[in-house]
Image (spheres, rainbow, N blue to C red):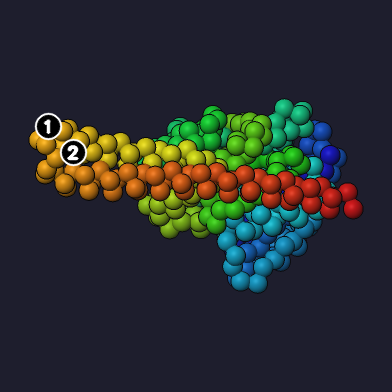
Amino acid sequence: MKLIIQIPCHNEEQTLPQVLQDIPLEIPGIDTIETQIIDDGSSDGTVATARAHGVTHIISYIGHKGLATAFKHGLNHALEQGADILVNTDGDNQYRSSDIPRLVEPIVSHQADIVIGDRGVTLNTHFSGLKRFLQWFGSRVTAGLAGAAIPDAVSGFRAYNRTAMREINVVSEFSYVLDTTVQASKKRLSIHHVPIQTNAATRPSRLFKSMLEHIKRSGADLIRIYSLYEPFKVFLCLALLFILIGTYPLVRFVYFYLAEGGSGHIQSLIFGAICYVIGFQFLGMGILGEHMRINRKLIEDILLRQKEDRETQ
Ligand SMILES: Nc1nc2c(ncn2[C@@H]2O[C@H](COP(=O)(O)OP(=O)(O)O)[C@@H](O)[C@H]2O)c(=O)[nH]1
Ligand SMILES: [Mg+2]
C-alpha cells in the first residue's frame, strides 16, 4: 500500500521541519510512504526547506490560490501518483505526525473510507474556552446536516482511502473540511474518528483573522453546502413557512367575506396572496434544485469514471 502524506503550506519554513521529522519511517500495513507539499505562493523558504528534507512531491503555485484549491489539487495529484491512502496534516505542527499510524489503521484494516483525527474539542487545553464551545457547536451543526456522528468537524488531520479520494469533489472556496465531510456522508462513505493529541499553537491561524470571521464564513459555507446536497428539503421548508404564514390572513379574509357579505379586509387577501406566491416560488426552486442535484450526480459519475480511466492508463 502506498501512503502519501500531504501538507498544504503557506509560509511554513519554521515548523515544517518538525512536521516532516516526526513522520514515522515505518507504518504497519504500508509499503511506501511519500510526502507532498502544496506551496501556495509562500514568500519564505518553505520550498527550499521541503527540498532539504526530501519531500517527494512539491507542488508550487505562483501567487496565492487558497487552501481549498490547494487541497483539491493535492488530492488529484495523489490519485495520479497511485496513492492508496492520502493523509492531510498541517504545516504549523498543530497535529502530531507520530499519530499517523493510528489515523490510517482503520483504512489499512478496511474498516473506513475516511478517518478524522478527533482533537477532543470540548476538553482540549490548547484551545480557549470560546474556541472549545464554537468547535463543539460547529461540529454538532455539521453532524446534524451530514446526518452522521462527527465529533470534530474542522479537524484538518484526516486520512482518505482511494475510494474516498475518487468520490470527493471539492467545490467549496473556503472550508473544504466541512464541504468534504458533508459530501462524504451524503455519498455514504464510511467515516471513522480516532482520538488524537495536538501540540500547542505555534502561531495564529492563517485561515481566518478572528473568531467572528471564522463563524461567518463557516456558517455561510454550511448553508451553501447543505442546499447543494439537499435542495428540495431546504426550499420545501421555506415554501411551507411562507404558505403557513399566508394561510392565516387568507382564512381570515374568507371568514369575513362570508360573514360580512363580501366587503373589506382586502389587506389580508393581498398579504396572504403574496405569501402564497413566494411560497410556491420556493417550491419551484426546490424542484429545479433537485433536478440540478441529479444532473450534478450524473456529472460526478462521469468524473469518477474519468479518474478511474486515468489511473489504469
Ligand atoms: N496551500 C495553502 N495552505 C494554506 C493556506 N492557508 C493556510 N494554509 C495551510 O493550511 C494549514 C492550516 O492552516 P492554519 O493557518 O494552521 O489554520 P488553522 O487550521 O486554523 O490553525 C497549514 O498547513 C497552513 O500552512 C493557503 O491559503 N493555501
Ligand atoms: Mg494551525
Q: Nearer the viewer, residue 207 or 72?
A: 72
Residue 196 appears in the rendering: no
Q: Disc 2 marks which amino acid?
A: Phe
Res 111 → quadrant: top right
> Mark on residue 259?
1
Helix, strand or loop status at disc 2: helix
Q: Nearer the viewer, residue 40 or 111?
A: 111
Horizontally, residue 313 falls left or right of residue 176, namely right
Helix, strand or loop status at disc 1: helix
> Mark on residue 253?
2
Mark 1 surroundings within 10 Å by alpha-carbon count, few (fewer than 14), some (14 through 19), many (20 or more): few
Q: Disc 1 marks which amino acid?
A: Ala
Q: Position of residue 271 (x, y in %)?
A: 23, 47
Horizontally, residue 83 falls left or right of residue 234, namely right
Residue 241 appears in the rendering: yes
Among numbered discs 1 and 2, the one appearing first in the sequence: 2
Give the distance between the C-alpha atoms of the residues marked 1 and 2, in whole angstroms.
10 Å
**With respect to residue 78, does 112 lie above or below?**
above
